[in-house]
Amino acid sequence: MLLDGDLLEVGAAADNIRKRMHPEGRVTFVVDRNVNYTNICESKCSFCAFYRDKQAEDAYILSFEQIFNKIAELTEQGGTQLLMQGGLNPELKIDFFETLFGEIKARFPTIQNHSLSPAEVTCIASNSGLSLEQTLGRLKGAGLDSIPGGGAEILVDEVRKKISPNKIGWQQWGEVMLKAAAIGMPTTATMMFGSDEKPEDIVEHLFRVRELQERGGSFTAFIPWTYQPGNTELGGTTATGVDYLKVLALSRIVLDNIPNIQASWVTQGAKMAQVALFFGANDLGGTMLEENVVAAAGCSFRMSQEEMINLIHGAGFSSAQRTTTYSIVREFAV
């Protein structure tokens, strides 16, 4: 999967756009935790090493107390963002999430609940006999603050039918995001590439995200990341570092209506993430006190807050901890 174009030329164009949009020369990050509340999933995507059937010995649904303990650890470390995602579990209906999110908001009022992918929202609506509007409204009322862009993979149905045939199509993914934006919920968008798509599918994905933003989307950031083949049914190999940097740079060039581009150190590692700061990225995402889905595919890069700050400063940028919606929590001197 190689996109045409000289790597350094594309990178320089993206870097110029990044400088124009973020002239302060600052790279941001959020202190967060991924809590995967269940690994039971009926979607069974071929690229995923995390999901389990209900009958599997290691299938689980976390108890509320387990979730609360994880969030307590996050707040103790100065964290501000909770990213809760799980499998498409038919047993979990709207009442489960309303009760859980209400308790989280009551116990941890400073935490931004940035949770559930469009596929999960659609699954909850279907399980509960509700419309998307009803589901989003009730989730927001219970304490869901914003929606991450997980489950986008490639927003081309021909690709989705090959790698995730049981998951919602790209138009449904976009519909959830536009409906969330319409009721004032911030969102993000992602792209997993390097699995079974063509270069033109990547370009189509980017322009579909751009169009959704133009139609009233609330994307605060875009996060491209590479497929990790370990322990998956799909198998294969992952994209090269050159491919990653080209796609990242192209993302910054095409998506000039989305303010922030995140580098994926979780899949690329610290050194490549540092290079990505010169290919259009202005953000390093979360410190991720916990991450299980990518780790299940055998990719287990870790980075402490101190390491992240040092990485940013080492590249010649100033650094700042941010909230989910990019308000600055505190800045760190170089």
Image (cartoon, rainbow, N blue to C red):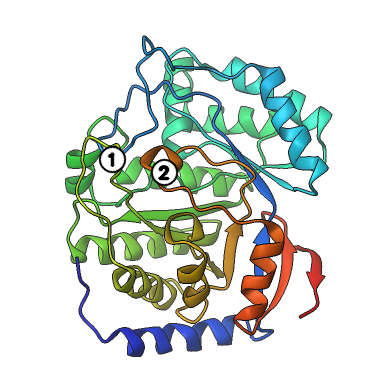
Task: Write down the residue under mark 1.
Answer: 47
Q: Please name the residue shown 67% across and 26% down the image.
A: 67
Numbered label attached to residue 175: 2
Horizontal arrangement in the rendering, residue 54 relative to residue 289 (left or right) = left
Labelled pair 1, 2 in contact (Cβ < 8 Å): no
Q: Which residue is pictured at 71% across the width and 73% down the height? A: 319
Local packing at callout 2 (Cα closer than 10 Å; few below 14, some 14-19, many 20+) is some
Nearer-N-terminus badge (1/2): 1
Mark 1: amino acid: Phe
Element class at badge 1:
loop
Q: Tell me the quarter of the image containing the N terminus.
A: bottom left
109 horizontally vs 18: left or right: right
The mark tally for this picture is 2
* Three-letter amino acid code at the position of disc 2: Glu
Q: Quadrant of the C terminus?
A: bottom right
Where does the image place residue 159, in percent across and percent down from the top left? Answer: 20, 48
Q: Estimate the spatial distance between the alpha carbons at disc 1 and disc 2, rounded to whole Å.
A: 24 Å
Check the image and report above or below for 292 versus 92. below
> In this picture, is 125 found above or below 263?
above
